[in-house]
Amino acid sequence: MNAPNQSGWKPEMETAAPDTVAPTHTGNRALMLEEPLIFEIGSSANTGVDLPEPGSGAANRLGGMERSDPIGLPGLSEPEAVRHYTRLSRQNYAIDLGLFPLGSCTMKHNPRLNEKVARMPGFADVHPLQPQETVRGALEVVNELAHWLLTLTGMHGVAMSPKAGAHGELCGILCIRAALEAKGDAREVILVPESAHGTNPATAAFAGYRVENIPATPAGRVDVAALKARLGPDVAGVMITNPNTCGLFEPELKDISDAVHAAGGYVYCDGANFNAIVGKVRPGDLGVDAMHINLHKTFSTPHGGGGPGSGPVVLSEALSPFGPLPFTARDQGGVVHLVEEEDAAAFGHTQGFGRMTAFHGQMGMFTRALAYILSHGADGLKQVAEDAVLNANYVLRSCEDVLDAPFGASGPCMHEALFSDKGFAEGFSTLDLAKALIDEGYHPMTMYFPLVVHGAMLVEPTETESKAALDQFIGALRSVAERARAGDPALKQAPFHAPRRRLDETLAARKPVLVWQEPVSE
Ligand SMILES: *Cc1c(COP(=O)(O)O)cnc(C)c1O
């Protein structure tokens, strides 16, 4: 299988590596344009707009508070500013450019319907300080989305306000803490499997708990016997990811939950991988007490540049009373209500631990996620999970003869395929393979995570990729894997075709330059 172009057309390949070709006068390479820092283009002496000189009247109004030295911001004309940011944007990789294989992150296509709905004036123009009567429609969106999140998870209540998965984890752990404190039960330990995402132990520690690791079995799942053996009166709860970060479903979660509950603790489920099971499994049926749902993963709202994250937390009946305000829960009749400070007492929601955010959360993400859920419907969401799992298994089985799949024998994977660097030539690493994948035109997969696998590569193709797109990616992945096994020396110098070659991975973090100084002339 050799990297066919999707259409079968293959471009004439360059014969010489770009750095052996004479450099251009501009430093540009065809449409790949060089771009300096904005401070290097502009100068504080320039300005893109004509402002009247501040006369003596202005000085009087400022009462002597006017600035005497230039602030040091770069001045650019409007086209210079537009071109700077447009050029930078062209150096980005995005889901709208191609397959984005980052595992654990669920980089889904962001449907344009979501964007259309979020831009409707009634949603786009609301302000958090508007009187409640004027935003009934927006609040109804929060309610309706809460209803579907509760329906899909089989849980009792949901805090919609957390602004990301990690923020949701904190919310869930604070609910557990509040529930234990209400019983006068001061437990100190949270158990976390060693394959967990780094945010899990960080959250537990941030909330004041001591974190203890639970080992994994050789098959890549939680060691249930070790977990049960550790339960006791000091254990506040466990944080478990299901499907886990090795890409495997934890079939014993119900058994684990029962044991944790019997020992007086609570079960936090990291729901970042919900995409693999949405519409198929309800975490509430598995005994989960709290779980965050990354709307920017499972429910297709944009990551990063296109908008902020959003991490609503669904809660069991046992934890719901301790959820933060505003809070959304079903009443006796099963109808979902949004509860705020004013009506908390009437609704019986009096033990909430506080607030996670000033307002209701990420409104623009709520409208997008609801548009996604309603446009798919129950059957469509189920198919999302099935297709995501099918695509990941296609990648796994298409590559396992050239890339070691440490848990390939554990059965089908869920929505992500995990490989290791076993079998690479001496001195060749996952990093080398990832850099070569950049030359192939792909953002690399998640690397060196989960930590339990040496040189881990976690590939999550998501459900919307066609077979042709997957075949092309598989071709690229197989090609770079074969080069890593053969020890192709060029792999050590990749990428050749990117705007920059190999960068110092840590320099910017270790020696940040935080203050711009204009170069001194002469
Ligand atoms: C993404 C992710 C998180 C954190 O979610 P954010 O929204 O990035 O804060 C936690 N756990 C797992 C397994 C994840 O993939």
Image (cartoon, grey):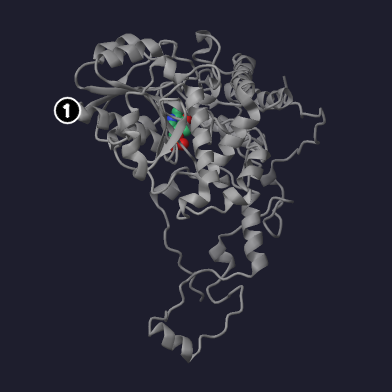
When asked about the image quadrant of residue 46, the answer is bottom right
Q: In which quarter of the image is ligand 1?
A: top left
Residue under the image location 76 percent in, 26 percent down: 4
Whether residue 450 appears in this view of the structure is no
Q: Where is residue 22 in the image (x, y as percent from the top left)?
A: 71, 51
Comparing 227 with 308, the one in front is 308
Comparing 352 with 257, the one in front is 352
| 457 shown above or below 257 | below
| 37 shown above or below 452 | below
Q: Position of residue 229 (x, y in %)?
A: 25, 11
Q: Where is residue 466 in the image (x, y as percent from the top left)?
A: 71, 25
- Residue positioned most to the bottom: 56
Comparing 452 with 161, the one in front is 161
Q: How crowded is mark 1: few (under 14 residues within 10 Å), some or many (20 or more)?
A: few
> For disc 1, does the CB lie below 8 Å from ligand 1?
no
| 199 shown above or below 452 | below
> In the rendered view of the protein, which quadrant contains the N terminus?
top right
Tell me the SS state at disc 1. loop
Q: Where is residue 168 in the image (x, y as percent from the top left)?
A: 40, 35
| 509 shown above or below 375 | below
Residue under the image location 21 percent in, 16 percent down: 232
Q: How many marks?
A: 1
Residue type, label 1: Gly
Per the image, the residue denoted by label 1 is: 184
Q: Is residue 151 left or right of residue 212?
A: right
Q: In this view, does 296 lie to the left or right of 12?
A: left
Whether residue 58 appears in this view of the structure is yes
Comparing 499 with 113, the one in front is 113
